[in-house]
Image (cartoon, rainbow, N blue to C red):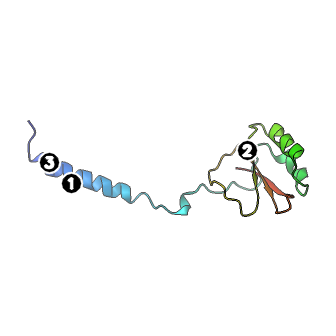
Amino acid sequence: MRSSASFPFTAAALSLAILGLAGCSSGSSSDAPPPMPAGSDTCGVTPLQKHVGEPLDVTLMQFFESAVPSHRVRVLKPDTAMTEDMVPERANVKTDNNNIITAITCG
């Protein structure tokens, strides 16, 4: 049988634990991972940089998918929604509104 004297202590400890956890979550966008340092090639895009300035077409996209070791490539156009998850082995091909490649990065 439990002692009624330990119940107030347990409830108080639980309340403090919940309050402590609530303070850990800020819910702000600062929880996003920091951007990758410049020059960091975690996805193998260095040889692809020569294609910046070229129009992105199906053939070039297939080449990128075969050239990137993880085969994970996403196209990011202006004003396109994207996830903020950082996937170091994924290549990002950024284009302008005319489908010209403006950057190729990892993430």
Q: Which residue is mark 3?
A: 7
Q: Which tag, 3 or 1, sits closer to the chain's start?
A: 3
Residue 15 coordinates in the image, percent (x, y)? 26, 55
* Numbered mark located on residue 96 in the image: none
Q: Which residue is mark 1?
A: 12
Counting other residues with Cα less than 10 Å from the Cα at mark 3, is it few (<14), some (14-19), or many (20 or more)? few
Asked whether the residues under the numbered discs 2 and 3 touch, taking CB atoms below 8 Å apart as contact, a structural biologist would say no
Q: Quadrant of the N terminus?
A: top left
Gap between marks 2 and 3 measured at Cα: 53 Å
Q: Which residue occupies the foreground of this view, 50 or 37?
A: 50
Counting other residues with Cα less than 10 Å from the Cα at mark 2, is it few (<14), some (14-19), or many (20 or more)? some
Q: At 8% from the left edge and 42% from the top edge, which residue is drawn? A: 3
Counting other residues with Cα less than 10 Å from the Cα at mark 1, is it few (<14), some (14-19), or many (20 or more)? few
On screen, residue 27 above or below 90: below
Residue 71 coordinates in the image, percent (x, y)? 76, 38
Q: At 42% from the left edge and 57% from the top edge, which residue is drawn? A: 24
Q: Which residue occupies the foreground of this view, 77 or 66?
A: 77
Q: Secondary structure at mark 2?
A: loop
Instruction: Check disc 2 and give the amino acid type.
Output: Thr
Instruction: Describe residue 28's horizontal placement relative to residue 79 as left or right.
Output: left
Q: Which residue is mark 2?
A: 42
Q: Secondary structure at mark 1?
A: helix
